[in-house]
Amino acid sequence: MAAASPKTALVVGGGFAGLAAAQVLTEQGLEVLLVEQGRGLGGRMCTRTATVPGTGERLTFDHGCQYLTARSPQWDAALERLRAAGAVAAWETGGRVGTAALTADDALDLASFSADKGKELLVGCPTNSAVGRALATAAGPRLTTLTGTRVSGLAWDGSAWRARAGRPPVLSLRVTPGRAGSAGGAGDEAAGSTAGSPASSVDEKEREREEVLAGLESRTFDLVITAMSSVSTAKLLGGGNGNGGGNGGGNGGGNGSVPLAADVAAAASAVRANVCWAVLVALKRKLDLPFDGALLSRPDPSGGPLPQYGAIAWLGRDSTKPGRPRVAGGAGEAWVLHGGPGWSNDRAAAAPEAVARELLGELAKLAQTELLPERDVLHIEAHRWNNAYPLNPRPPVPPPPGSRAAELGPGVLGLGPGGPGLGGFYMLRADMALAACGDWAKGPRAGDAYVSGWEAAHALLASV
């Protein structure tokens, strides 16, 4: 880059959009600080761990995104890098993941199961939490990650950015300055977790983290990219007037009464998000179901094009994924259940224990068996995703003809002659060296979020 080019960047949000943006920026020689509110990197591509009382048996559940598939040249290239790094592997289930139909009374039509053999399903190894760490590692030593930290405000003085940040009440978090960092915490797995580490090691990591956090508010940045949910984007850039709170891996927080970027905040506020309850259950025995994962729906009785979902929209036998621990010595299995959109939204304020009991009953109904907690269940818990996926993503707005971003052809972007240019899955404020991205700007898939971040970083670099 030219000598006058920007040298430092702040990325707010450590999901796939933020990680994609960070890699593009570091590849262009920028020093990047990525700040993530949650315990680890990768957004909903994550894993929850649990220990069975008495036996110490370790259980894992991929309670968010279930698997990854190829979708675009940019995302496909990232998947190949992940495969080469050993961070993903095929979910080898012999055609046992697909779709199945529900009857009118929400029973499972076993004969309707159809395996999805047209695409490879990739999962993280040894768990889904490995994917975010691997994407951060690919960005190299110019990336510093700071997890367990919420950016609560941004300030632009016409030439540089400053940030305010704080620590939400989460446990066992760590930072790795100068290279890909990770975070481990109660219930969430991450490489290098401080659990079981000597006290001196834990203290040293906390000191490192505090130093980076203290330095955050005293430094300036040439560029800022926000890579959060629509809710958190609206709150951070809209002066605290967003459309609600959320825990979808972003960094929220008010920014005073004056919007930083009112147009971006308004666009993000217009995107509605769905609640999704995830129930994680480990059983002492196996269920007689003819698949390891299935999306369950029934046709719209009115003849509409959209499928109708019941209480359980997805159920997956998580313990069949490569690298996952055996359950009950191999006699049992781990399941992840995702509540249907309407069912989850109706219970958005419900107690997790009540949700877990209800969906366990629905699982028993689908499997046509009895499941008694005291007899059959090793572990059960419920997790609510407040911003599970965007229901009405912002339509793409390609860069205007003649702009530098519009001139970024496939060769410039390193995608070869057949690759795409920028599709407009981001929002750009070149006047203040700001870009906003996330799944709300493209679509609900992991690859959608990645492409949004990738495009946002390229567009921002081309505009300043």
Image (cartoon, grey):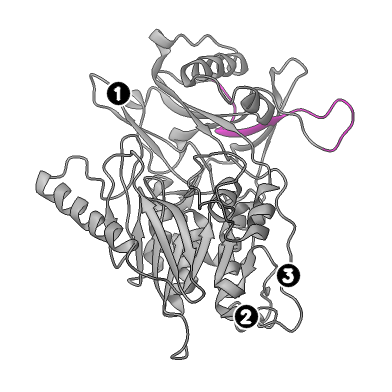
Tell me what residue is drawn at x 38 percent, y 53 percent.
165
Q: Earlier in the sequence, mark 3 or mark 2?
A: 3
| Circle 1 crowding by C-alpha within 10 Å: few under 14, some 14–19, many from 20 | few
Which residue lies most toward the right here? 303
Please tell me in which quadrant of the rendered image residue 179 appears.
Answer: bottom left
**SS of the residue at dot 3?**
loop
Residue pointed to by mark 2: 416
| Badge 2 or badge 1: first in the primary sequence | 1
Residue behind mark 1: 52
Instruction: Please report the residue visible at 55 percent of the width from the left and 77 percent of the height from the top.
Output: 461
Q: Of the residues shown, which amino acid type is indicated by label 1?
A: Val
Residue 193, compared with residue 398, is above or below; it is above
CA distance separating discs 2 and 1: 51 Å
Dot 2 alpha-carbon crowd within 10 angstroms: few under 14, some 14 to 19, many 20 or more: few
Horizontal placement of 159 versus 97: left or right? left
Please give the name of the residue rendered at 68% of the width and 59% of the height, measured from the top-left corner: 263
Q: CA distance from mark 1 to mark 3?
A: 51 Å
**Residue at position x 35%, y 49% from top?**
166
Residue farthest to the front?
A: 257
> Which residue type carries mark 2?
Gly
Q: Residues within 10 Å of mark 3 (few under 14, many from 20)?
A: some
Q: Which residue is mark 3?
A: 398
Among numbered discs 1 and 3, the one appearing first in the sequence: 1
The stretch in magenta equals 288-305
Query: Is 95 a magenta residue?
Result: no
Is label 1 in contact with label 3 (beta carbons under 8 Å)?
no
- Viewer-proximal residue, 9 or 194? 9
